[in-house]
Amino acid sequence: MNTFDVRIWSILTRVRTKKTTYQLRWVVSKRIFSADFDTKALADSRRAELLLAQRRGEGFDTESGLPESEARKHKSDVTWYDHAVAFLDMKWPALEAGSRRALATSLATATLALVTDQRGMPDYDDAFTALVNWSFNRHARMAGDPSAEFAAAIDWVRGHSVPITALREPRTARAAYDATTTSPSGQPYAANTYKNKVKGLNGAIKYAIELDLLERNPLDRISTPPPRTTTVVDSRVVINPTQARTLLAAVGQQGTTGARYVAFFATMYFAALRPSEVLALRKQDCFLPENGWGRLRFAESSPYAGGAWTDSGDDSPRKALKHRAKHESRNVPAHPELVAHLRAHIEKFGTARDGRLFVRANGGDIRYATFANIWSMARKAAFSSEQFFSPLGKRPYDLRHAAVSTWLNAGVSAPQVAEWAGHSVDVLLSVYAKCIDGHEQRDIRRIEDQLRD
């Protein structure tokens, strides 16, 4: 924003032990700006420039304190790289660790697309890693200069980054957008990957508009439809109870490590918990009677983020449940088989000091790659080759889908299933619409009855 509320003060001489400097101060809309000079002549010259701009009737920018003509040139010199770093720093304090990492990867993708030329460009993967782990990680930048491993790539990207104003050019905006839809190898990104990448790009552009670096969002002019997204669960991934029990047995046969994950996967299958919710589950959250049904009551999840992205340095900080306010809890009934699995797990492996049921043998936080690998090995052991290469139960998360589908097909009311699963009723019915059996046959019978003579 520009204003004519400007006062330019006289030069202030600042006498110090080792050096005398001359300070120019001026006020723009009640905000004080200053600049120090080694000689009085330089300070007077700069004061004369500001006075001349004021006499010409130029407004002064309230953010930079500069005359409008200078502020415009200053803004045109801001590179995409510097702006993206500033945007991340602005967002960083309010973001959770996983969101910080997601934003860093999306900004790195856009930044590598917004360079002046490709000559001498470092290896893409090396440059991407350097940007994610230093340029767009505030903790790493505040800790000092980049490591030798990252320095050359970062210097090249910083030196070849286009001005932020280059996004006004349709071809430049198109290059940035295309980077969110297609990998450097030419493979289209999955819909969710695209969604995360374009979200970061859009956020940085909107911040540029907020700072008057751009007048409008150049992506609004791009007509290419985004990749189609779907939230409906594919019924082909849903395992039946016999397959679930066979897979759990196969998990236990994957050596000493596999034995630690039987109850982990059983909790996902019988209680429809998300992996991050299972990782946060503590003994004190569980009512596990010797016989009959138990109950799980929990109020937090613990997604793996990596200590580089957290303020505490913890790999898996505890957070509120998804779609729930802080400290809001959720209750889920525990099938007798699940109760037996959890009691056996506690008896054999104990708990962490804070009561968590599922940690590594050394007490460390479990990573997604670890249990995903165990699950893949169990599928290979339990399934035929045809089943293994099919979508059936391919991801650990599909156990949650199987649990919710089982509840719905058992006739449990949608509001109750939604409460147990941590969904709204609308989301529940839209996501699991294809997993509810019997509707088609029932509707066909109704049509036949209507058409009967």
Image (cartoon, grey):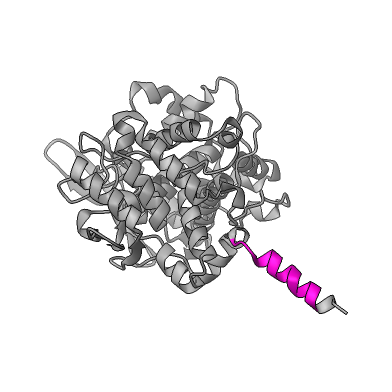
Figure quadrant of residue 421: bottom left
> 185 and 418: which one is in front?
418
Give x and y (percent) for residue 299. 29, 62
Q: Quick check: 188 left or right of 154? A: right
Q: In this view, does 395 lie above or below 412?
A: above
Q: Residue 441's spot in the image, x, y percent?
A: 70, 65
Residue 189 percent coordinates (x, y) = 61, 40
Residue in the image at 49% along x and 73% along y = 413
- Residue toward you, 285 or 266: 266
Residue located at (63% from left, 28% from top):
185
Q: How many labels does the image show?
A: 0
Quick check: can you spot residue 260?
A: yes
> In the picture, which quadrant includes the C terminus?
bottom right
Tell me which segment is drawn in magenta. 436-449
- Position of 274 with respect to 319 (left or right) is right
Viewer-side residue, 207 vs 267:
267
The answer to if 57 sits in the magenta stretch is no
SS assignment for the magenta stretch, majority? helix
Name the side, left or right, on which 156 lies relative to 302.
right
Vertical order, 123 against 48 (above or below): above
Who is closer to the viewer here, 24 or 339?
A: 339
Give left or right: position of 285 versus 106.
Answer: left
Can the viewer see residue 78? no
| 446 part of magenta stretch | yes
For the point 33% across and 53% down, the residue is: 338
**How far across and how far down the image is residue 33, in percent?**
33, 56
Instruction: List the single residue furthest toward the left.
Output: 17
